[in-house]
Image (cartoon, rainbow, N blue to C red):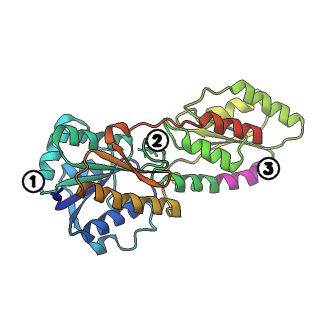
Amino acid sequence: MANTIKKIGLLTSGGDGPGMNAAIRSIVRYALHYGVEVSGIMRGYQGLLEEDIIPMNHRSVSNIINKGGTILKTARSKDFSTDEGKVKAAEILRKKKIDGLIVIGGDGSYRGASRLFELQGIPTIGLPGTIDNDLNGTDQTIGCSTAINTALETIDKIRDTAQSMERVFVVEVMGNKSGYIAMQVALAAGAEDVIIPERKFDYEAMHQAIIEGNMKGKISWIIVVAEGAAKAQVVSETITKETGLETRYVVLGHVQRGGVPSGQDRILSTRLGAAAVDLLLNGYYGKAVGVLQDEINVIDLKDATRRDHAHMDAYYDLLKILT
Ligand code: F6P
């Protein structure tokens, strides 16, 4: 097929994640290698509507592979979420002679890219950029590995004080609809329990286990909570009330979104960036690109916006066996 893509637009959208810059670098340099121009669109779909668009060259992406955040900045755009917003966005892309759009973002960003393709015929490709790891068609999303490492580093420190002061700690991690980070972090931190949105949680059983453990001489606990499942403060206060043990809570929050991207995130981003350009140049539009079992995997954007992790129950059972 003759390549009709001469200029690619590139944006990051929604919550940022470590590794997005590595993806930007890969897309820019890979596209330039094949003689395709790249326009960087600032602040996601909002910047597109405001025509905040810059030309990018080899040097624009120097020294960013190891940086968290996104040099293109990001936003959650209310204006773009309307049908009129999408019409206007498509008009601007045509006016700027941008033939294809690569969107790095999560489920909301994917829905936008999918609609731009379906309603307006804009050739779009999605790269999974979210710490939540809640998109279909990829084993991991960009930023998730680093976010898990960041949370773990902090929980390891919390463990020191929990043990020294003989306390229960409840640690809230990110994940509004997805308990993936919470489950992985709980397993890797050796936590005693984990509360996630995908599983009904038996609070009474947890309180009972803490009381019984304490009677046998256990002195400290780490309970991990996904933000979408419960509030750490409430869980912590209830534990104190039901067990009589001193409890503290920590909300890790946005610290999980920043920092130096892990090797895994950089490699994933670098591979996906090049694959996204390949797709556009070969006439595949409205697609989400991921890596499944170490192979590049491509599915329709509209099928990529949701993911239910199959192994949450198995992970939980393992965690409970090991505590
Ligand atoms: O989508 C990524 C994420 O970090 C979620 O885990 C979290 O619920 C949300 O973004 C927080 O969004 P904001 O930065 O807009 O508060």
Identify residue for label 2. Answer: 134
Identify residue for label 1. Answer: 95
The three-letter amino acid code for the residue at tag 3 is Gln
Quadrant occupied by the N terminus = bottom left
Range covered by the magenta-colored residues: 154-165
Give the crowd class for mark 3: few <14, some 14-19, many >=20 residues within 10 Å: some
Give the main secondary structure of the magenta stretch: helix
Give the crowd class for mark 2: few <14, some 14-19, many >=20 residues within 10 Å: many
Query: Where does residue 87 sit, x and y in percent of width and height?
Result: 15, 40
> In which of the image's four quarters is ligand 1 placed?
top left
Camera-nearest label, 3 or 2: 2
Pick the front one: 169 or 320:
320
Q: Residue furthest front?
A: 1
- Sequence-earlier tag: 2 or 1: 1
**What label does residue 163 carry, if any?**
3
Residue 160 within the magenta-colored segment of the rendering: yes
263 horizontally vs 280: left or right: right
Distance between the alpha carbons at the discs numbered 3 and 2 = 33 Å
**What label does residue 27 carry, if any?**
none
Q: Is residue 23 above or below residue 91?
A: below
Pick the front one: 262 or 27:
27
Distance between the alpha carbons at the discs numbered 2 and 1 = 34 Å
Secondary structure under the numbered disc 3 in the rendered image: helix
Distance between the alpha carbons at the discs numbered 1 and 3 = 62 Å
Give the crowd class for mark 1: few <14, some 14-19, many >=20 residues within 10 Å: few
Question: Residue at horizontal 46%, vertical 41%?
Answer: 134
- Sequence-earlier tag: 3 or 2: 2
